[in-house]
Image (cartoon, helix red, strand yellow):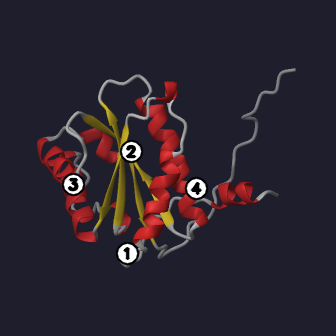
Amino acid sequence: MSNLMQIIKSRRSTRAFESKLPPKDQVMQLVEAAEWAPSGMGKYLWHFTVVYSAEKSLTLARAVAEADNRGPDYNFYGAPVNIIISYKRDEHHAFVDGAAAMENLLLMATELGLGSCWINQIRECCDDPKVRALLTEYGVPEDHIVICSAAIGYIAKETPAKPRKEGIVSFVE
């Protein structure tokens, strides 16, 4: 099996993180991997906002929890880093471009031995006034919507692989 396939098969959604921050150079490697994702028509109208602070990540999680009725325990699984992928509002390729960037980021996290979890909740409430104020403060451009984000950090509890479903491929010759 190729090294890439091993990384793909070992990637998991981490739902329990240690509080220790990973090195900045590793976090920037995640963003670099995301930047190299394909973009429809070569537009690359995304922006990557790195929240490299457990306190600021928790502040954002609390605002999202309030806006989305998630309850007081919602905390992005305790991850000390959150990487937000945003895209220029009303762009046709925003969601598929953002998803491609996120997959690259998640695979690079696995390669570097970091835990990651794809977070969609910010997307649902990125225009809530309290959430938007924080996003703007953290550097998300005003004319962008949040596509997704990634909780990043060291894994506190391993996540087992879930079985894959049968019969999901049609092969036509």
For the point 68% across and 57% down, which residue is it?
9
Residue 143: where, in percent of width, then height?
23, 33
Name the residue type under label 1. Answer: Leu
Query: For the point 19% across and 38% down, which residue is it?
Result: 142
Residue situated in front as seen by the camera: 149 or 23: 23
Q: Answer yes or no: do the residues labelled 1 and 2 have beta carbons within 8 Å?
A: no
How far apart marks 3 and 1 lie (CA) works out to: 18 Å
Q: CA distance from mark 1 to mark 2?
A: 21 Å
Q: Kindly identify the amino acid type of the residue bearing the numbered disc 4.
A: Leu
Q: Which residue is mark 4?
A: 107
Q: Contact, CB < 8 Å: mark 4 with mark 3?
A: no
- Provide the secondary structure element on which disc 1 rests: loop
User: Counting other residues with Cα less than 10 Å from the Cα at mark 2, is it few (<14), some (14-19), or many (20 or more)?
Assistant: many
The residue that mark 1 highlights is 21
Residue ID for mark 3: 138
Task: Say what amino acid the circle numbered 3 marks.
Answer: Tyr
- The quadrant of the image that shows the N terminus is bottom right
> Which residue is depicted at the point 21% across and 54% down?
138
Is 69 or 117 nearer to us in this picture?
117
Identify the secondary structure beneath mark 2.
Answer: strand
**Distance from label 4 to label 3 (Cα)?**
25 Å
Q: Is residue 134 left or right of residue 76?
A: left
